[in-house]
Amino acid sequence: MVVLLSQQKITNYQDTESGPQQEKLPSNPLNGQKFYQYDEEDNIVAIYDCVNGEWIERKYDYKALHVKFLSALATDLGTVKAGTINGVTINGSEFNNAFTYTESGVTYTGTTTMKDGNVVISRTGSDGSSWTTKVDRQLGFEDSYKAGSTAPARTTRLGQGKLYMAESGVGGYLPASALNPTSWVNLPYASGWTTAENNPCQYRMFPQLDGSYLIRFRGQFAPTSGTIPSGNQQPFGAGGIPVAIRPDKTEFGYGASNQNAGGRLAISGAGNFFYNPETTGQTYCSISGISYYIG
């Protein structure tokens, strides 16, 4: 079915020789007539004007359209050359961008790809270098650089609360805990023992770059009365060393005393702290002479 519009009046014109979209334009049109062509779904697919006795196809300019929301148009956009697009939601797409830029005398050529939650920026330099930067949905941020085709890659990765760096096949993590300061913690005394010379016995955990901890001690202990007895003494009681800082095997150190001779310090995996003085008559002992790593 086609419609003819002439002199402000609409008249029907039926072409029985062809189907939708293939209908022949009526012969002998009158100036001012319009011809509307439809598809199988009764959508207008073409408009013609009669000018000087001939049919002229007309197109609607975008200025003549008023569409409040693009979502009101149901269509396959195909390849679109766009200017500035503001305030939209785009689902299920892949973005690719090719670029070239010069920095510090080196010209870089590369691509940026955004797909499936990942962003990858790959570029090669005129100096033979290659450089890839990623924002990965699983690994986090990763940056890898090679000064040349045979040069070792330098990789930095930041994700899951850790900073990872690698070069020439050697790499390691910098855990977040290594960047946080720690405090000295008091050790509780067993009955019969106390602090000497206002120097309380304490420990501190120092985070290391490899994820382990250095355990350090400081302070002095003394008996609440008299001198330190001979034999193994436990100023912090049985299992007095906190579980978090216990070594996996017995660690040893030397404890200085008020005398020229001190004694042996030992901390077992069960958390027992022992002091065995070399001489009698000692009034205090320092614990700063023992330290070890855990983890």
Image (tube, rainbow, N blue to C red):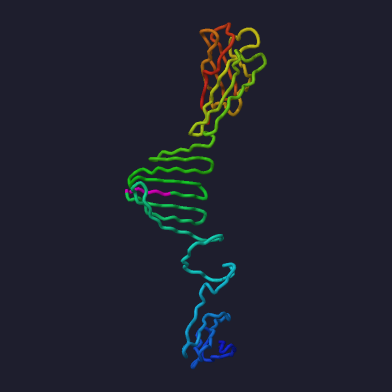
Determine if the magenta segment contains residue 85. no
In the image, 287 versus 141, the foreground residue is 141
Q: Quadrant of residue 187?
A: top right
Q: Position of residue 177 (x, y in %)?
A: 54, 34
Q: Position of residue 93 (x, y in %)?
A: 51, 61
Q: Quadrant of residue 151?
A: top left
Residue located farthest toward the right when viewing the structure as drawn: 191
In the image, 113 versus 34, the foreground residue is 34
Residue located farthest toward the bottom when viewing the structure as drawn: 28
Q: Image point 33% across, 46% down: which residue?
A: 148
In the rendered image of this protein, does residue 239 appear above or below residue 46?
above
Residue located farthest toward the top when viewing the structure as drawn: 281
In the rendered image of this protein, does residue 118 appear above or below residue 157?
below
Q: Position of residue 34 (x, y in %)?
A: 53, 86
Q: Image point 49% across, 60% down: which residue?
A: 94
Quadrant location, the N terminus: bottom right
Q: Image point 66% across, 13% down: which residue?
A: 192
Q: Image point 44% across, 55% down: which residue?
A: 112
What span is in magenta?
Answer: 127-132
Q: Position of residue 2 (x, y in %)?
A: 56, 87
In the rendered image of this protein, does residue 165 appear above or below residue 67?
above
In the image, 257 versus 64, the foreground residue is 64
User: Left or right of 133: which side holds 69?
Assistant: right
In the rendered image of this protein, does residue 80 appear above or below residue 26?
above
The total number of labels drawn is 0
